[in-house]
Amino acid sequence: MTDLDRSTTLAGGGVDGGTGVPDPAGTLCALIADVLGLAAVDPGQSFTGLGGDSIQAIQIVSRARPAGLLVTTREVLRSETVAALAAGARAVGRSGAGTGPARPARRFGPFAPTPIMAWLGELGGPVDTYNQSLVLRSPAGFGAEDAVRVVQALLDTHDILRLRVPGGAGAIRGGADIPGTDIPGTGSAGADTAGADTAGAAGEDAGEAGAGAAGAGAAGSDSTGSDSTGARPLVPPPGSVDARALIEHVEAGAVGDEELPGLVTERIRAARRLLAPAEGIVLRAVRVDRGPARQGRLALVVHHLAVDGVSWRILQDDLRSCWEALAAGRAPEPAPVPTPFAHWADLLRADATSGRRMAEAVRWTDTLRPAPEPLGGVCAADRLDAESAVNRHTLTLPPEVTGPLLTVAPGLVNGTVNDVLLTGLALAVLAWRRPDTGDGDGGSVLVDIEGHGREEITDGVDLSRTVGWFTTMYPVRFDLGLPDLADARAGGPTVGAVLRQVKETLRSIPDHGIGHGLLRHGNSRTGPGLAALGIPEIGFNYLGRFPMGDTADWAAAPGHDFALDDADEGLPMAHAVEVNAAAHEGPDGLTLSATWTWAGNAYPADRVRALADEWFAMLRALARHTALPGAAGLTPSDVSLTGLSQADLDAFESQLGDLL
């Protein structure tokens, strides 16, 4: 306790702790309050206790860097207080801290597809238009040339926004032995041969939007861009893609507030159809001008190969800083990116065949074992219907439930929002099928979980400013036995016990499951065997927490979803049932929305809707459970002593009570 008390005093007392920042704790408190949408944060509070999640932790890391502080995502999530986080912060650039990879990082040229890229290539269907979009409130007076300069700055800063995929997204294939993508130091095929003089704006005479992306992806076009193993994505140097050719300008001065979302949605759909990864066009923008005195809209439509939920937060921050620079008469220059996407892809390619990953193969094979119960085993992906708007169902939990669910419940077990949501889902599946399976139910639930994928698998890598599609997808089996479902629905001790089980199951997975995708899509020895096992029937993705209702410039515009996947009709379902959940911080408080989609040939609509209702019933039970005396407690992963079971810890707590 002495060391913790000393660090808390140091960080909270205005001393820089060697960082050179006058008040590290105060700086981090302000950053956390801004990211979480809170009025203020005290140094004695914890990030996770305030409801922060892993995606928001990455935002903290990204915003701390310009303030002179280097912290990691793991430190943000695991520090018991902001003061303790500040005490461990380092100065950016001091003794090599925060400078990115130790060796020069490769930015340009071809690279081996990452696992999620290879997954998309296998999915089939209209994947060339598979995208995410974001609509923001653009400032009054944000003109056409402003849009060009801002978007050009994004293109030149974030390499993956210049991505080119010979043959298109559907031609991407995985496998470790892809020629021409040598890791720096082992070969020259992927060497960065583009000099600094290639950077800068290019093609200023390319013409107006809609005339085609003149010059887009021209630099870096490589006749060896594809081979028998599939397409090799490549990144050309800055300046090779012209923003002017990628922006549509729409005059909407006479359009009312109610009609505006419809107009923007229509133009987003048109922009989606113009995405062409084979030609190096993975970004389109729509600028909606409502006159010099009113906010307009800026919609960015980006192919999913080049963006994810974390990336949108990076781009949103960059848009703010670029506009501030323009308004002050400066050139828009977003902060540099410590670790380029191509370098990360190189690291993944090497890790896919490493001994530590090969050792995980048995784990993943066992996880994907068959089971007779619905949503307890695997299915064949190629037998599922395509996505359909008819097979879609959305529910929302109100603030009085969502607040304690997402901010208090994780803290009961020193856990995360994902721990809580997956506990509810696992219990819901058991309750949903129990009338059919009875006491013979094996108690196993198999879920494919999506993670943000920005894992700290090696030293010297900082992905807090890297834009790209990092998503991981990995199967997790929850073996829960036969819990008392009536007690669980009532918010009793059962729901707390299952929460501890789920947390420990998730903590036992190395590096948040990144190894599964590496072995499945990046390793030619293990990939075929894992592919033959099939996929979990149900997929789950928590997108994080988003502020809503903000009217400031560059805030998310009303009437549009935040970064949800979209594509042309005919995209195959990746699972029989999928759940995408997101928390929204609005004027009335925090809400949780969940969108369920399903393959029509897998489950009937009434069964999926019943499961959705059961999940929310279990989440309400978890929220009620937070008010029970003694609901909080330790789990084995919280203590350093090995060999302690949950039963041991429960016994200690019952004997020692508040002393723990």
Image: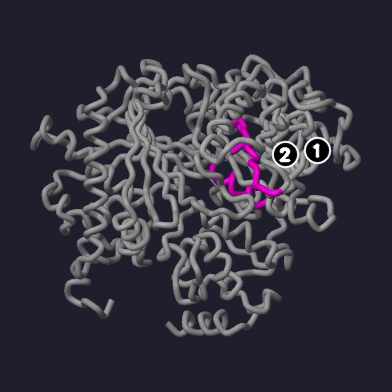
Residue 527, above or below 472: above
Label pair 1/2, CB-CB below 8 angstroms: yes
Quick one: label 1, few (<14), some, or many (20+) residues within 10 Å?
many
314 in the magenta segment = yes
Residue 419, above or below 533: below
In this view, the residue farthest toward the left is 439
Residue 354 x %, y %: 55, 39
Position of 53 compared to 422: left or right? Answer: right
422 in the magenta segment = no
* The N terminus lies in quadrant: bottom left
Residue 13 x %, y %: 57, 85
Name the residue beneath numbered marker 2: 159
Colour treatment of the image: one colour
Give the amino acid type for the residue marked by disc 2 in the picture.
Answer: Asp
Q: Residue at x 72, y 62 (%)?
A: 96
Residue 142 x %, y %: 73, 45
Q: Which residues are magenta?
A: 293-318
**Dot 2: what SS?**
helix
Name the residue beneath numbered marker 1: 238
In this view, the residue farthest toward the front is 254
Q: Residue at x 53, y 80 (%)?
A: 7
Give the amino acid type for the residue marked by disc 1 in the picture.
Answer: Pro
Determine which quarter of the picture holds residue 205.
top right
Q: Residue at x 49, y 72 (%)?
A: 41
Q: Can you see residue 345?
A: yes
**Dot 1: what SS?**
loop
* The C terminus lies in quadrant: bottom left
Q: Can you see residue 156?
A: no
Q: Earlier in the sequence, mark 1 or mark 2?
A: 2
